[in-house]
Image (spheres, rainbow, N blue to C red):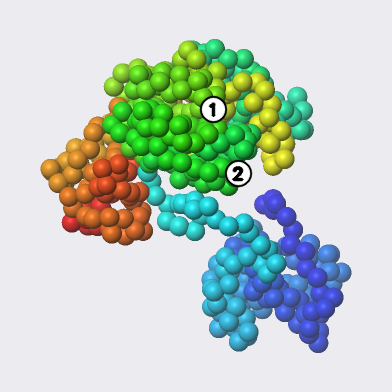
């Protein structure tokens, strides 16, 4: 069996009267310290004896003793491994205290000073994950994806793609995205106007970095994607909320804000507003673009789930409409496949893309060429379009299942509008709970917030759930609010 690394042992300062005792003590120390992790493989007796310059029989006897004590275990023809369950009764009092003391976990080291938090809601780090509309990775086309990765790796090696490249992304993926935008989104762009990023959140943050806080505030929708708001605040912008209603961003209210504030940019999720799922009407899209030209502010369009529209053809993106020269269009391929692939794109004027590329050079240098080549391969071969069609049918069925299940469980005690697309429902549960229940619902794994009407709403994600799992989630919700 090939091992990724061979564990190195150092006996120079290890206590013990004999070489045997010193080796036993050092291995136990390394296990207690977490250097040798449970399940990790130990060097073979011959290799370790050669490394330490000792007799192989000494190493074999040490391994046998540690197996008897419960620190190691062996498997025929495979080797010796650190035990999954360690003999804590054999630890010293000092080491017992280290094992049992959890108070130090997660604290920054002394001297590491962090900047103040801007109120980001960290739903994935240190908190229970909330499914508020994520894709189902079980729907991934694993076989085509694995073949594409193999071809991409070979190509990357042969054509030197594993060296430093263009911070805007590989030409192949940018060209594939260009084709998709032109054919599916009505967006005639050139490669110089496209920048590949590690998901839409990175695109939002880079847009904020490239804009100038001295030019004015960032206007966001009153109910807004929290990490986006945090990204703007972290880059020095004052963030101002604009009201929304059943038609999306209220452009009349935006005009009033423009009379009070200098505005650098407006951030919007027009396709399916986050979290309410409403679609920005064409009338308001045109009004927003007109205001952008008149007042010279940027429009940051987060088009995070354009592919998943069920009832009819989606309204074209802001970036495809006349007068969209100030639009920064951000899209995500992570929603198409899986969040873990970390691929998105930013489309804007080439000068703005160059400015974004300068920011990428400071933190990322370049992306993942192998993944980018693999996705470009799948896009060009038609596999991505095929997968989208399949996933769209599945997500529509799950949307209908979630809507029927919620209605069956709660009847007229709740209210929601069936969204035309996306992977979540925005459910008004205000007749069942008050705003004091929001923290409890969030702790239980539900995205809960007060809606524009002041009533408590749940963003019920159905995308990553099978029909059986949707029923279980509805049951869990019922236990929390009834």
Horizontal side of 98 relative to 270 (left or right) equals right
Compare residues 217 and 140 and report the one nearer the observer.
217
Where residue 181 appears, as percent x and y from the top left, is: 51, 17
Q: Provide the residue designation for mark 2.
A: 235
Mark number, residue 260: none
Image location (x, y in percent) of residue 31? 65, 71
Q: Is residue 276 positioned above or below 96 on the image?
A: above
Tell me which numbered mark, 1 or 2, is placed earlier along the sequence. Answer: 2
- Horizontally, residue 240 falls left or right of residue 378, namely left
**For residue 342, which quarter of the picture?**
top right
Task: Reply above or below: 47 against 233.
Answer: below
Q: Are marks 1 and 2 in contact (CB under 8 Å)?
A: no
Task: Point out the residue furthest to the right here.
Answer: 53
Residue at 40 percent of width and 32 percent of height: 256
Q: From this viewpoint, is residue 152 visible?
A: no
Q: Position of residue 5 (x, y in %)?
A: 73, 55
What residue sits 31% from the left and 24% below the top? 310
């Amino acid at each position: 069996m090939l091992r990724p690394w061979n564990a190195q042992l150092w006996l120079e300062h290890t206590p013990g009267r004999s070489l045997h005792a010193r080796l036993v003590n050092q291995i136990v120390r390394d296990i207690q310290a977490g250097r040798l992790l449970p399940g990790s493989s130990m060097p073979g007796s011959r290799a370790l004896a050669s490394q330490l310059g000792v007799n192989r029989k000494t190493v074999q006897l040490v391994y046998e003793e540690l197996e008897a004590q419960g620190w190691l275990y062996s498997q025929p023809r495979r080797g010796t491994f650190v035990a999954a369950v360690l003999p804590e009764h054999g630890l010293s009092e000092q080491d017992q205290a280290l094992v049992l003391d959890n108070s130090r976990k997660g604290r920054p080291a002394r001297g590491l000073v962090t900047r103040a938090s801007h109120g980001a809601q960290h739903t994935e780090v240190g908190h229970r994950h909330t499914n508020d509309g994520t894709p189902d990775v079980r729907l991934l086309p694993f076989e085509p994806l694995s073949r594409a990765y193999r071809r991409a790796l070979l190509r990357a090696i042969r054509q030197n793609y594993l060296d430093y490249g263009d911070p805007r992304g590989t030409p192949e993926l940018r060209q594939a995205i260009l084709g998709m935008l032109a054919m599916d989104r009505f967006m005639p762009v050139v490669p110089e106007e496209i920048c590949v990023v590690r998901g839409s959140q990175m695109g939002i943050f880079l847009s904020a970095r490239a804009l100038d806080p001295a030019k004015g505030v960032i206007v966001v929708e009153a109910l807004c994607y929290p990490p986006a708001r945090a990204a703007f605040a972290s880059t020095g912008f004052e963030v101002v909320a604009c009201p929304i209603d059943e038609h999306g961003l209220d452009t009349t209210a935006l005009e009033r804000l423009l009379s009070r504030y200098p505005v650098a940019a407006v951030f919007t999720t027009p396709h399916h507003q986050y979290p309410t799922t409403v679609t920005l009407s064409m009338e308001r899209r045109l009004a927003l673009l007109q205001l952008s030209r008149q007042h010279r502010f940027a429009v940051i369009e987060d088009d995070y789930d354009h592919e998943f529209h069920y009832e009819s053809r989606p309204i074209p993106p802001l970036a495809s409409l006349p007068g969209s020269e100030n639009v920064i269009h951000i899209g995500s391929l992570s929603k198409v496949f899986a969040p873990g692939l970390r691929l998105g794109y930013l489309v804007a004027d080439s000068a703005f893309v160059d400015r974004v590329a300068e920011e990428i050079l400071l933190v990322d240098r370049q992306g993942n060429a192998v993944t980018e080549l693999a996705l470009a391969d799948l896009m060009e071969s038609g596999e991505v379009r095929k997968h989208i069609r399949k996933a769209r049918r599945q997500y529509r069925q799950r949307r209908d299942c979630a809507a029927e299940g919620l209605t069956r469980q709660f009847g007229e005690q709740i209210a929601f509008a069936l969204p035309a697309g996306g992977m979540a429902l925005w459910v008004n549960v205000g007749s069942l709970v008050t705003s004091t229940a929001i923290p409890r619902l969030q702790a239980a794994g539900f995205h809960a917030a007060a809606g524009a009407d002041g009533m408590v709403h749940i963003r019920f994600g159905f995308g990553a759930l099978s029909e059986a799992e949707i029923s279980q989630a509805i049951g869990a919700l019922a236990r929390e609010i009834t």
